[in-house]
Amino acid sequence: MVRSCYWDDAIEDHGHFVGSPDDFIAWADGTTLMFETTQHAILNHVCDLQGDEAFCETYYHFSGVTAEGPNFMSTGRYVDHFCRRDGEWRIANRVTIVEGTYDVPKAAHAPASPYSADEPSQARRDRSDVSYHRPPLPRRPR
């Protein structure tokens, strides 16, 4: 799905990575798989639409949880150039501005987990994740 967002001739300029969409996806997959879990939030967005081109800026927040800590957080902006070709919009080029990277310590007094061995978390990094269930399968009240 990520690959379908880019035109074949797009350049992804993303912090330590600069290259093609295919190479970016492989790099990003390898980077995020270093973490036990990740979240990527898309925040404020502005778009300057000019015919078959759009110039956009979108803030992001990324966090990655590690087994031993510290955890990782990154904040910044995507500065995108979108083009419409044959009626279809895709990213023509993206520049990712990394504005901050942070080591986040593990919480000293983390709250007790709401999950147990009998009712484990349904968060997975594959198609067994609850988001793939149709309909989603909630835990049952006690």
Image (spheres, grey):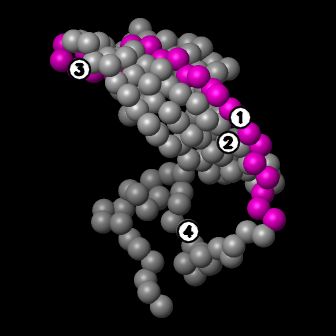
Report, in whole angstroms, how far the alpha carbon at label 4 lies from the one at label 3.
38 Å
Residue that label 4 marks: 121
Can residue 125 be seen? Answer: yes
Q: Residue visible at 58% across and 81% down?
A: 118
Tag in front: 4 or 1: 1
Q: Are marks 4 and 2 in contact (CB under 8 Å)?
A: no
Report, in whole angstroms, how far the alpha carbon at label 4 lies from the one at label 1.
28 Å
Task: Name which residue type carries label 4.
Answer: Ser
Residue that label 3 marks: 88
16 with respect to 138 (left or right) = right
Residue that label 1 marks: 101
14 with respect to 81 (left or right) = right
Disc 2 is placed on an element classified as: strand
Can residue 23 be seen? Answer: no
Residue that label 2 marks: 73
Label 4 neighbourhood size at 10 Å, few (<14), some (14-19), many (20+)? some
Q: Residue furthest top?
A: 9
Q: Are marks 2 and 3 in contact (CB under 8 Å)?
A: no
Q: Earlier in the sequence, mark 2 or mark 3?
A: 2
Q: Residue visible at 50% across and 33% down?
A: 59
Tag in front: 1 or 3: 1
Magenta-drawn stretch contains 105: yes
Q: Residue furthest left?
A: 87
